[in-house]
Image (spheres, helix red, strand yellow):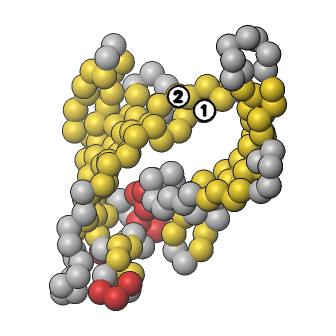
Amino acid sequence: MKVTDRSVDANNSNNWKHKDSIAEMLRLSRQGGGLDGVAGGRQAAIGKVERESQSAGEFGEVLKAIFQPSSKADIKWKEAQLLGKETIHVFNYKVGLANSDFQIDGAEGARVTVGFYGQVFIDATTHNIRRVTLTTSSLGKDPAVHPASITVDYDTVAICGQSYLLPVAGRCA
């Protein structure tokens, strides 16, 4: 849990007054085949204000879908590239419908399992994943299911003096 105390100096007089405290916690859990993202609460100085935001997929579900043994991903090295001054190895992968548990929304909120393919970009020095792409395939006959693609970028982020590999950007199309 992270607690942030906020103070203000309304008159620029170096006379700071405590405004409020914010307590936030990252929770990951499996519910309905998805991954819950960030949930947090705010305790304001006057009264209580609740805040919650949710995210599904980009934190860990995409990596799990590719690398869990049951996916039987067909992974092949493609090439080496430069990302700034770092060498990155690019791997193509494919997960067939028969081995996939990756789901997207279909008609009337139904979840539809699809096959998918994409690329994984791995730092040659640290062996950290720097980017993952995923494009759906094997969409079936549901007219509400459209092709989708996801890109998640990862980088090292300092939190309280410790470095963590975290998603820093994500795009869906």
**Mark 1 nearby-residue class (10 Å; few <14, some 14–19, many ≥20):** few
Q: Quadrant of residue 45?
A: top right
Residue located at (69% from left, 23% from top): 10
Q: Disc 2 or 1, which lies upstream in sequence?
A: 2
- The residue labelled by disc 2 is 156
- Relative horizontal placement of residue 167, taking residue 72 as reference (left or right): right
Q: Describe the element under mark 2 as helix, strand or loop.
A: strand
The residue drawn where x is 48% and y is 41% is 167
Image quadrant assignment for residue 136? bottom left
| Residue 100 placement (x, y as % from top left) | 37, 71
Mark 2 vs mark 1, CA separation in Å: 5 Å
Residue ID at (45%, 59%): 57
User: Is the residue 156 above or below the residue 59 in the image?
Assistant: above
> Residue 88 falls in which quadrant of the image?
top left
The residue that mark 1 highlights is 164
Label 2 is placed on what type of residue?
Thr
Give SS at disc 1.
strand
**CB atoms of marks 2 and 1 within 8 Å:** yes
| Residue 53 circle label | none
